[in-house]
Image: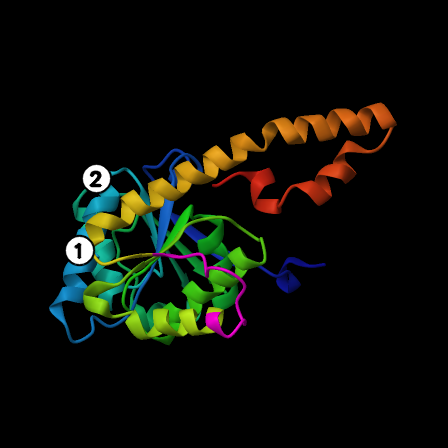
Amino acid sequence: MSDKGRHHPQTILSAPQLAEPAWMTRRSVCVFCGSSQGNDPKFSAGAIELGIELARENLGLVYGGGSLGLMGVVARAAIAAGGHVVGIIPSSLCARERPPDNLHELVITTSMHTRKQAMFDRSSAFVALPGGVGTLDETVEQMTWMKIGHHQKPIVFLNVDGYWDPVLAMFDRMVACNFVAGEVGVEVVRYASEVIPAIKAYWDRETRESVGIAPALTAMIEGAVERGDDPQAELAFAIPAWTAAGPE
């Protein structure tokens, strides 16, 4: 196929001073939030505090790449506090949402779908700040992927001033009506200062559970070898995909 007809899924623009992509060596948190600031200053205050906290904890910020609304607020706060920020945006939104010039890395994708996949690939956790239907769509998609075993990365709703209460009530109703089995699998906090402790507690819990299943997996592999079975085939049924890869 000629290069003219080849599909290029995304363009990556990186700051020239970086010797290697920082996301390869740093855990990053993906923040979903509105391209508007909303009508309550508490929303922006929460975004500012979250950006600062991520920088202080040396956790990278992955976000939607724009300079408007809470997206711009959290990105500017993280950068000003010395944090590493990656913006991921589809080319169709670049003119409307105007990516900042001082991002450490800007990823321009060809579609919303490839944008969301890139955000997932580069993130170790997800946080939902107040936002609109796009924010809800992105967060619920990660919840869906978690429920089907596609990943085991923490998802946190930053419920500023009760903004997410109606949505959280709907999740409870889904469980009560047996449309969702068990818990929906998200953490809910009211203050930005509680976000990172919730994420770290989740990471610690997943690490302990992964370590806990190691003896059983070892016994399973040894048994398969003794029987002449394929250990990889055994593991394919025994280990969820996220366990094999580890919490990123």
Callout 1 amino acid: Ile
Residue 17 at least partly seen: yes
Q: Residues within 10 Å of mark 1 (few under 14, many from 20)?
A: many
Q: Is residue 50 above or below residue 210?
A: below
Q: Is residue 205 above or below residue 78?
A: above
Question: Which residue reaches farthest front?
Answer: 176
Callout 2 amino acid: Arg
In the rendered image, residue 159, in percent from the top left (x then y), is placed at 26, 63
Query: Which is nearer the eye, 154 or 14?
Result: 154
Q: Label 2: state its secondary structure.
A: helix
The magenta span reads 176-187
In the rendered image, residue 139, in percent from the top left (x then y), is placed at 41, 63
Residue 184 covered by magenta stretch = yes
Q: Residues within 10 Å of mark 2 (few under 14, many from 20)?
A: some
Q: Residue at x 46, y 59 (%)?
A: 183
Q: Label 1: state its secondary structure.
A: helix
Give the tally of numbered discs.
Answer: 2
Residue 21 at least partly seen: no
Is 12 placed left or right of 43 in the picture? right
Q: Residue at x 52, y 66 (%)?
A: 113
The residue wearing badge 1 is: 48
**Rendered image: mark on residue 78:** none
Q: Is residue 246 above or below residue 71?
A: above
In the rendered image, residue 60, in percent from the top left (x then y), is placed at 32, 44
Residue 171 covered by magenta stretch = no
The residue wearing badge 2 is: 56
Q: Residue at x 52, y 67 (%)?
A: 180
